[in-house]
Image (spheres, rainbow, N blue to C red):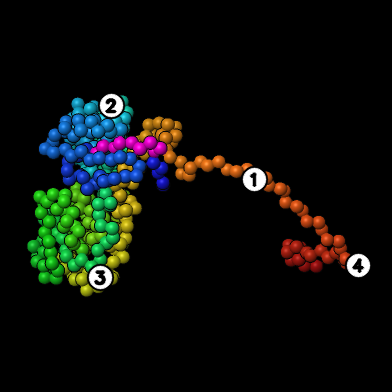
Amino acid sequence: MRVHPPSSPQRVAFLGEPAFEPHVPVQAAWAQVRFFPVTAGQWEAAIDAAHAWGADATLVFRPQDVTPELAARLPGAMRIGIIPSPLFNAAEIELLSRTSGPDVKGFRWLTYLETPASPELARLPLLQTLPLPVDTARCATGPRLDSRRVLVADWARPTPEALEALLKVAPVDILSAHATPDEVTRALEQAGTLVYASRDLMGRFDALPLLAMAHGLLVIADTVFASDWYVEPEDEFLYRPDSHWARAVDEVLRMPVSFRPVRIRAWQKMREAFDASACFQRVLHDAYLFADPVAHLASLTPARPSTPVASVAVEPPRVAEAAPEALGAEKVTRPSRSLAAVPN
């Protein structure tokens, strides 16, 4: 569904830890956007900076870290909390129930990365299911199909035996768990394949697989994504146990053309379904639409500019006069199909 931008661009502030910056659009055609990093839990400084900037709407990553007093100080007429990873802590869920809702001075809406699994989560004011998006504008303009380097995240590495087998077939870079967002980006730009071991569904606690796909890497993993994300194994990534990773990487290096469609489909999926600018535009569109449908629809830029249409006089079509019958001609009535099928 196409979402038209508002006729007067608004200022949208994003607040969160520095690790969330790659998931914020660096620019957007539908709004002025800006990321305000929260370092060492200093929410007050980020909120004050967003106020000084004059934010019309505020989106906060990990709203469960915001106290009721700070939530009440968030700037803008629309405030939305983005929950990027699963919530299990009862105290955090209870806090969100006090800082969010239509009658609360805090978050009007929340988003959750998947369909809520517990009644406590389902009772929160959830606007929509939203996996952590990726700002694809920060990524490569196209998949680097000729890169032979393999990237392994230190926190998602395979067994020692599987890693040793990988080192025999391809150059492997280990991404440190303490890497900064810029270091993660540089590592992704140099690699061609990400191999990823996880005890949970991919993307739930770590956005690296999505970032890798957005950069055009081939992802080989021993698990899958959440079903409601619609990232399909074999179509957009390779689903293999880590004992088969060395063989899979060897096949990629020997027959790179065979796996290019997987990389290209994944790269395109990130832009069609996970792009940060499009996802957050839709979030705000839905939030404003539910708040005041008439006012929000009136504020949108029309699909086509209304231009005056010149009036053109249209004459009614002339009915051609029937030609006179030839003298002596006989009128022949052709039987219809139904009549012709009746036996004598």
Closest to the camera, between mark 2 and mark 3, is: 3
Q: Residue at x 18, y 34 (%)?
A: 46
Seen at 28% across and 26% down, the residue is 104
Pointer 1 residue? 312
Q: Earlier in the sequence, mark 1 or mark 2?
A: 2
Q: Is residue 197 found inside the magenta-colored segment of the image?
A: no
Queried whether the magenta region covers residue 11, the answer comes back as: yes
Q: Residue at x 28, y 58 (%)?
A: 141
- Quick one: label 1, few (<14), some, or many (20+) residues within 10 Å? few
The three-letter code of the residue at mark 3 reads Pro
Residue 344: quarter of image: bottom right
Nearest to the observer: residue 333 or residue 154: 154
Regarding mark 4 in the picture, which secondary structure is present there? loop
Amino acid type assigned to the residue bearing label 1 in the image? Val
Provide the residue span drawn in magenta: 6-14
For disc 3, the marked residue is: 256
